Amino acid sequence: MTPENRVIILTGATQGIGRATARVLAGAGCKLALAARRVEPLQKLAGELTAARHQVVAIPTDMGDPAQAAALAQKTFEAFGRIEVVINNAAIGVRDRVLDLQETDARRVMDVNYFGPVALIQAAAPYLKANPDGGLIINVSSIVGRRAMPGIAGYCASKAALEKMAESLRLELKADNIRLSTVYPGVTATRFNDNSLGGSPTGRGRSAGAPPEQVARAILKTIRREPRDVFITLFDRTFVTASMLWPWLMDKLLSRHFR
Ligand SMILES: NC(=O)c1ccc[n+]([C@@H]2O[C@H](COP(=O)([O-])OP(=O)(O)OC[C@H]3O[C@@H](n4cnc5c(N)ncnc54)[C@H](OP(=O)(O)O)[C@@H]3O)[C@@H](O)[C@H]2O)c1
């Protein structure tokens, strides 16, 4: 769909990929409902974009709470009178081997990365259906939702759940003209590890990888073209394709890499 004037819900907008995406989408003329937990950085970003004459509202939301995730859709409709795109970008990680995984951490990751997006989609769907040209749901997953890595199983499982849900939903909502795209970033230079739960030592601080602006531009392109699956780099696409074709080979390579 054309991005200009579209009303878009974007979760996880206070930093990293979400913040970069907010700037790119605002620049493309989108009207944005920005969500995340931390009020101060959320309002700072909204202020920056409003000062540049973009139409933006900040809606503090904990996506780990289904009631708040659902309220995000209602509040967006109240602010703009319609909802055309939902971007589920907010997520947290958990770093622990399966045998060390704390149940509370594993459940929190599923709450934020899976149940929150489901609640938001359920609440937004009636508004998406009501548009003359339907609506678009974009889920930001990860290449590790397609091929899990050791040490982050809880996170991988949450992204795989999101992807499988979207696979069903795409067919369920076809008749309502609601389309679904999944974006699969690989390693991206954000502070994602700072938010990760779990006991394993993590590389805190900004990680190496693709710049978040590259993912943001891919998300804008996704709105324009609505592809089913979106990879950011050739390496990411090759990694996922090779993992599907030769899972045993990937087991060997990964076990050597993580030894
Ligand atoms: N960075 C990578 O290497 C990488 C790779 C593959 C996929 N991804 C995916 O890309 C997306 C964005 O990640 P990122 O790297 O930009 O991470 P990030 O820098 O940690 O940003 C995550 C965003 O989500 C928000 N958030 C976290 N928990 C939330 C909650 N309970 N409710 C609402 N918002 C919440 C955070 O804001 P608050 O703290 O203010 O709530 C923040 O704005 C995620 O879906 C992630 O899984 C990232």
Image: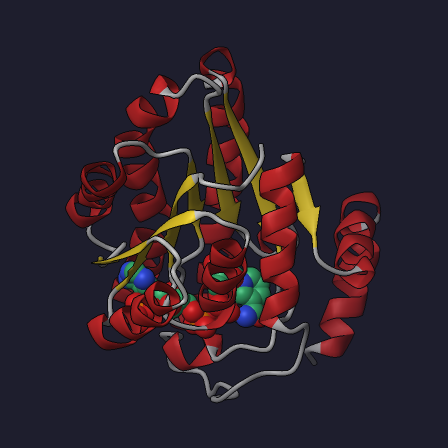
Can the viewer see residue 148 in this picture? Answer: no
The one nearer the camera, 13 or 50, is: 50
Q: Is residue 134 above or below residue 82?
A: above
From the viewer's perspective, is 69 left or right of 110?
left
The one nearer the camera, 209 or 130, is: 130
Q: Is residue 25 above or below residue 78?
A: below
Which quadrant does ligand 1 occupy? bottom left
What is the total number of numbered labels drawn onto the structure image?
0
The one nearer the camera, 89 or 114, is: 89
From the viewer's perspective, is 131 left or right of 210?
left
Position of residue 95 measured from the top left corner of the image (x, y, whole percent): 45, 74
Residue lying furthest top: 175
From the viewer's perspective, is 89 left or right of 197?
right
Q: Is residue 131 above or below residue 20?
A: above
Position of residue 141 measured from the top left corner of the image (x, y, whole percent): 54, 52
Residue positioned 15% across, 44% down in the render: 67
Position of residue 158 measured from the top left corner of the image (x, y, whole percent): 44, 52
- Quarter of the image with the N terminus is top right
Residue positioned 17% across, 43% down in the render: 71
Position of residue 137 measured from the top left corner of the image (x, y, whole percent): 47, 36
Residue positioned 27% across, 39% down in the render: 80
Q: Is residue 14 above or below residue 241?
A: below
Residue positioned 83% across, 49% down in the render: 246
The one nearer the camera, 252 or 118, is: 118
- Quarter of the image with the C terminus is bottom right
Can the viewer see residue 42 in this picture? Answer: yes
Q: How is the image coloured?
A: secondary structure
